[in-house]
Amino acid sequence: MLKVARSAEEVRGHDLMVWLGGQGTAQVFRHEGEALLERLEPTPSLTDWALSGQDDAATRVLCGAAAGVHAARVPPWPDLPGLPRWFRALEAAQGQGEVFARAWGTAQRLLTDPRDVRPLHGDLHHGNVLHSPERGWLVIDPKGLIGERTFDFANILCNPTLEHALMPGRLDRQSALIARQAGLDRARLLAWVGAYAALSGAWHLEDAQEEQARQSLAVSALAHSLL
């Protein structure tokens, strides 16, 4: 499969894929401004698993895929943006309501005291982990960021759909499972979910997607309520 970058963000993602070297990721066979990638199968689908009663199994696969991305590698790291830049939209939205304001406060606390900093996928969710019959589950389409490892798990809990993320008991159960599987502090994971979901809400508002923004803010509020 040939993937041609169409934005600076996609170029950064390519750079991260090259640096990861196929460990836990689709293989980049050649990179020269354009990336020739290993072809992965659309089925089985982690989205289908999560929506059909196999949420725990899908979450375990996602945690395993994240471990491949986060594994220790020989420096230097690729030149990627840091998480503070990523959260500028949330900073700008902080005056648009209590949920945004609370989430920005949470984000500031996390960003000023980062832990276990390393290169991150930046958009880890059910649609960005695909199956290779030969090599198992592998990530695709990273954003490419530098930041705290726990951040990379927040988007899992906003997916595979916002409606699913808001199902009663789902965030509580899956956050506990991720914390166990990935060796994370659950309260810190929930704090990242609260910050990230509101950031996603800010992006949705920028795109005039009001219903998605409302649901994202509901996830943020729910995560904060579990802290």
Image (spheres, rainbow, N blue to C red):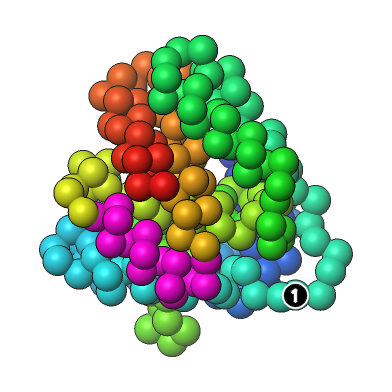
Q: Is residue 130 above or below residue 110?
A: below
User: Is 128 or 222 nearer to us in this picture?
Assistant: 222
Q: Position of residue 208 (x, y in %)?
A: 37, 17
User: Is 93 or 120 nearer to us in this picture?
Assistant: 93
The quadrant holding residue 48 is bottom left
For the point 44% across and 40% down, which residue is it?
A: 194
Instruction: Residue 39: tell me if it is visible.
Output: no
Residue 108 in the figure: left or right of residue 50 = right
State the residue position of label 1: 73
Q: Would residue 179 be counted in the magenta stretch?
A: yes
Q: Is residue 99 above or below residue 182?
A: above
Secondary structure found at label 1: loop
Q: Is residue 216 above or below residue 78?
A: above
Q: Is residue 203 above or below residue 224?
A: above
For the point 50% across and 38% down, which residue is it?
A: 195
For the point 35% across and 30% down, which residue is it?
A: 217
Q: Position of residue 218 (x, y in %)?
A: 30, 33
The quadrant holding residue 214 is top left
For the point 55% across and 36% down, which residue is it?
A: 106
Which region of the structure is painted magenta? Answer: 170-184
Residue 89 in the figure: left or right of residue 176 = right
Residue 31 in the figure: left or right of residue 211 = right
